[in-house]
Structure formats: structure tokens, C-alpha cells
Amino acid sequence: MVAVSIIVPNYNHAAFLHERLDSIFQQSFQDFELILLDDASSDDSVGLLSAYKNHPKVRCLEVNSKNSGSVFQQWVKGIKLAQGQYIWIAESDDFAHPEFLERTVAVLDRNPSIGFVFTDSEIVDASGMRQGLASEKSNMISRFKKLDREVVKHTDIPNYFINDLLVYNVSSTLFRADALRHIDMDFLKQFYNAGDLYTYIAILLKTDIFYLNEPLNYFRVHSENTTKSNIQNGQLHRDRLLIMAYFTPLLYTIAGCKHSLSLFIKRHFLVSSDFGFISELQALLKVYRKFEVLPLLTYWHLRCFCFLKKKVPGYKPYFYRQFIKRQLGQLIKHTYEVDG
């Protein structure tokens, strides 16, 4: 069995592919197979990828005739093709330090109970110029580093995965294949942007994960980043609503989780309703009420607001919105007192 399966899901990243693939082929750890996936790119990506098709490390090149609409459908395809003990989903616009695999494989080899390891990242711009470390720019990561810990446990989910994300991007992550294959692949394929968050929580509920405090990944920020477009069209909010509805029954007993879940609904409720994700909000509210994240009166106030938004498109009454904001603020105080 090959040690690592590397999956490169690509869409219209021709400008970055050479640097991405060179950084893979130049890894100091060489026991890997490479799976190249293209989601019907309209740039020169297919031609560039085809040039690598006969490389001895490339197991296959799969090109979609029609765009799938979701990178996570490509993830699932790659995971099913992978034969390695470990899986690295190497996003096509990022690149890696030559020792990324050597260092992360060593962590998983030494710690058989760890579901995945993730590293610090160097943030770069479209031209590759360094912009600083993720651990310096992310309050979440810097806060975790101050704890002088390496292992992240399921009890850390409320603080590091509900309202922010400790893992900066998936290219910085090496998964244990067995841990990755046990998540719900059909559910993963529904996401447009936050499938990585779903994946991290699903694995963390079953195994510990490991933070390797070394900048071994280069995360590229540029105008075509998928996350930027999904923030603008609201899909990021929709994805996160689905994730919290899915996981609340599994998380609500963890200390501090109800407060984190209430903070989540405070941050996402009004903006998600403005984007029109009413059905997703209603589903989340039902789950929150069932597991006593929401008091009954708050639940009905929020339900009524959803009803009006659904029946009257564009409904944005100033005074009612201010009332809902106050209700959500009181919810934060309530759950802090209960969870505290």
C-alpha cells in the first residue's frame, strides 16, 4: 500500500498549477500517489494537467465534462479513488514546503489515535509574496498556541470550531484515510464552501487531532478564492446552518457548547434570513429548541420572524429587526449563565 494519496481538485487555477504540482513532486517524502481532478475548467488547466498525466507519481487524471458546482464532490471522488494510508487534499492554488509530508506523516505514524494533523500556514498573495503566518493573523490559532498544546480534543469544539475555525485551510492538513472515510460522504457533497468545517468536526467527534506548529503550507489569497465568492452569495452561511443543525444533537452536552451555539445563531440569523435561507434557519431553530439551546419564547419570536420573511420577500422592518437583535443578545446572556 502506498503511504499517502494526494488529491488535487482543480477548477480554473491554471496560473497556479505548476507551482502546486512542483511543490508536490519535490517533497522529501516520496511514498505517494497523485490523483488529479479537474472540474470542467474553462482556462488552460486541462492542458497543463495533461502534461503530467504520464508522470510516474500520477495515478490518474479525471476531467469532468460538466462543472459539479462543488469542490466537495471532487473531494468525495478523490477519496474513493485513494489507496493510501493517509490522504492529503492539496488545493490547486496553494503550495507546500518540501518537508510537509515528511513532518506530517511522522506525526500520524507516531500517534495512531490521531485522526488528522494540521500545520501552520504562510499566507501568500497571487504572486507568491509572503503576507505573514496564519497563526499571527488568526486570533483562534494564536490563542490555541498560547496553551502550549498539540492535541485538540472533542471538548475543544465549542471554542475552536463553531464560531471560528482553528484549521486555517485544508491544504495544511494530512488525514488518516480511515478517519476520513467514516464521515457521511453524501452529506459532504451538499456543501458549497464549508465542507471542510463539517469534515473536521465529524472526525474530531471520534478522534483527537494534532497541531504541528510549523509553517509547512502556503495558503494563497487571490481574487478568485472560492470562499470570497461564497461569502458574497451567502452560500457560506447556508452551509454553516446545515452543519450546526447536523451536529447540535451530538454537541449540546459538551461544556460551553450551548453558549457557543447561541452565539452562532446571533451572528448568522439576520444575515441568513436576508439571503433567503429561511428553510435552513427553521430547521436549525427546531433542533435548537429540541436540545434546549433556545428558550421557548425566543424560539417563537425567531420562528415568527422567519414566517414573515418567507411570506413577504424583502421584509426588513427596522423596529422588528432591532427587537430580534435584543432577543438574540438576551439569549447570549441566558446561555452564558446556564453553561457557565
Image: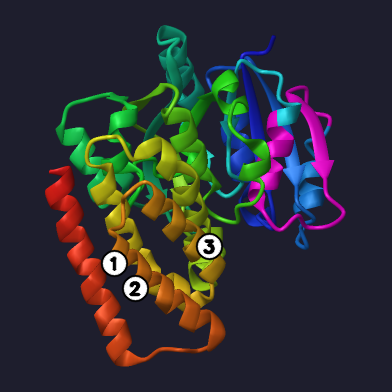
Instruction: Tell me the SS state at disc 1.
Output: helix
In the picture, the quarter occupied by the N terminus is: top right
Q: Look at the picture and state if 249 lies above or below 226.
A: above
Label placed on residue 204: none
Residue range of the region highlighted in magenta in the rendering: 54-79
Percent position of residue 53, x then y: 82, 34
- The residue that disc 3 covers is 280
> Cα distance, mark 2 to mark 3?
16 Å
User: In which quadrant is the C terminus drawn?
Assistant: top left
| Residue 61: in magenta span | yes
Q: Amino acid at mark 1?
A: Leu
Place of residue 225 in the rendered image (x, y in percent of width and height, measured from the top left): 53, 60
The crowd level at tag 3 (other Cα within 10 Å; few <14, some 14-19, many 20+) is some
Mark 3: which amino acid?
Glu
Magenta stretch holds residue 284: no
Few, some or many residues within 10 Å of mark 1 (<14, 14–19, 20+): few
Q: Is residue 25 left or right of residue 126?
A: right
Label 2 or label 3, whichever lies nearer to me, is 2
Give the structural element (helix, strand or loop) at label 3.
helix
Q: Quadrant of residue 90?
A: top right
Q: Residue at x 36, y 91 (%)?
A: 317
Dot placed on the residue nearer the N-terminal end, 2 or 3: 3
Q: Tag on residue 301?
A: 2
Q: Pointers 1 and 2 in contact (CB under 8 A)?
A: yes
Q: Earlier in the sequence, mark 3 or mark 1?
A: 3
**Position of residue 339 in the picture relative to residue 185 (left or right):** left
Residue at x-position 16% and y-position 31%: 147
- Asked which secondary structure carries label 2, the reply is helix
Q: Which mark is residue 297?
A: 1
Q: Nearer the viewer, residue 52 or 253?
A: 253
Q: CA distance from mark 1 to mark 2?
A: 6 Å
